[in-house]
Every structure is written in C-alpha cells, then in structure tokens.
Image (tube, grey):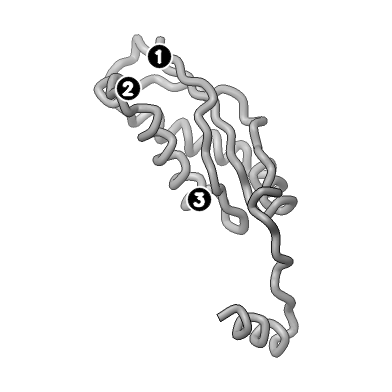
Amino acid sequence: MRALAVLIAVLYGCSPPPPYDKADCPLYSELGPVRANPAGALGRSFEVQLAFKVCPPEAGLAEIRRKRIELKQALLKHMSAMTTAQLEDPLRIETLQKDVHLLVNKQVLKKARVIETFVTGFEVK
C-alpha cells in the first residue's frame, strides 16, 4: 500500500510526507484553563486544563498553535452543553478526555492529528 502511495506521489509530482516516530510528537500544553457553565446550572462552573500530543511533530504543533482560538471555542461549546449529571459521573474525566480527543481531530485540526489527549486539571465550582 505504501509503495502505491509513493508511486502516485512520484507520478503526480509531489513527495510523500517524511516518516516520523510518534515518540517524537510534541506535547501542546499552552491552551490554558478553559472555564464553562454546565447546561442548566448558571450558578455553577467548571474548569478544565488540557494537553495534547500532536503529530506530525513540527507541522502538528504549528497547526494547533495557529488554531488556538478555534480550539477554545470548540471546547467551550462542548463543555457548555454538559449537564451537572455528566459532571457528577464517576467516569467524567475519561469521558471528557475521549470526547475532546474526537472533537479536536474532527472539528479543529485538518492536517495534523492529536494522538493523545491529557486532562491535566479538572475542577467543579
């Protein structure tokens, strides 16, 4: 399959992206805290801190930095739709981690990919 991709790239004048080791993919942790009010609970709020391992190494980090505002907007929209019941679920961190991972790869990043999402802080007030 890889040989076919290389052949197509050569025939059409573009080269395949250089291979990289996923261990070399950097961690993006510059987003800062994201705060939101859960759906239906205006008197309460919660704050999340996240970090993302992005690939390919240089291009991935550049794209997520460039799309910082779009990333925060997508996270706020998702977090504001969460209910207090979801925030009280014992598996809330794991669920949020999976949801954010999918959200970033489907809605924010186009050329790069998040390969790991880390919740580094979570506080409900």
The residue at which mark 1 appears reads as: 124
Work out whether residue 89 or residue 81 is closer to the camera in this orientation and state it: 89
Tell me the crowding category of disc 3: few under 14, some 14 to 19, or many 20 or more residues within 10 angstroms, Cα based.
some
Quadrant assignment for the C terminus: top left
Rendering coords of residue 117 (x, y %): 52, 39
Judge whether 42 appears above or below 100 on screen.
Answer: above
Q: Residue at x 39, y 33 (%)?
A: 94
Q: Residue at x 60, y 85 (%)?
A: 4
Tell me the crowding category of disc 2: few under 14, some 14 to 19, or many 20 or more residues within 10 angstroms, Cα based.
some
Rendering coords of residue 120 (x, y %): 54, 25
Q: Which amino acid is tagged 1?
A: Val
How far is disc 1 from disc 2 in space, using C-alphas?
Answer: 8 Å
Q: Residue at x 50, y 50 (%)?
A: 105
Judge whether 56 appears above or below 81 on screen.
Answer: below
Rendering coords of residue 75 (x, y %): 48, 34
How far is disc 2 from disc 3 in space, using C-alphas?
Answer: 23 Å
Q: Quadrant of residue 78?
A: top left
The residue at which mark 3 appears reads as: 105
Rendering coords of residue 82 (x, y %): 33, 29
Using the image, tell me which numbered label, if any, was put on residue 112. none
Marks 1 & 2, CB-CB < 8 Å contact = yes
Marks 2 & 3, CB-CB < 8 Å contact = no
Quadrant assignment for the N terminus: bottom right
Q: Which amino acid is tagged 2?
A: Leu
Q: Earlier in the sequence, mark 1 or mark 3?
A: 3
Find the residue positioned furthest to the bottom. 11
Using the image, tell me which numbered label, if any, was put on residue 87. 2
Marks 1 & 3, CB-CB < 8 Å contact = no
Q: Quadrant of residue 93?
A: top left
74 vs 16, left or right, is left
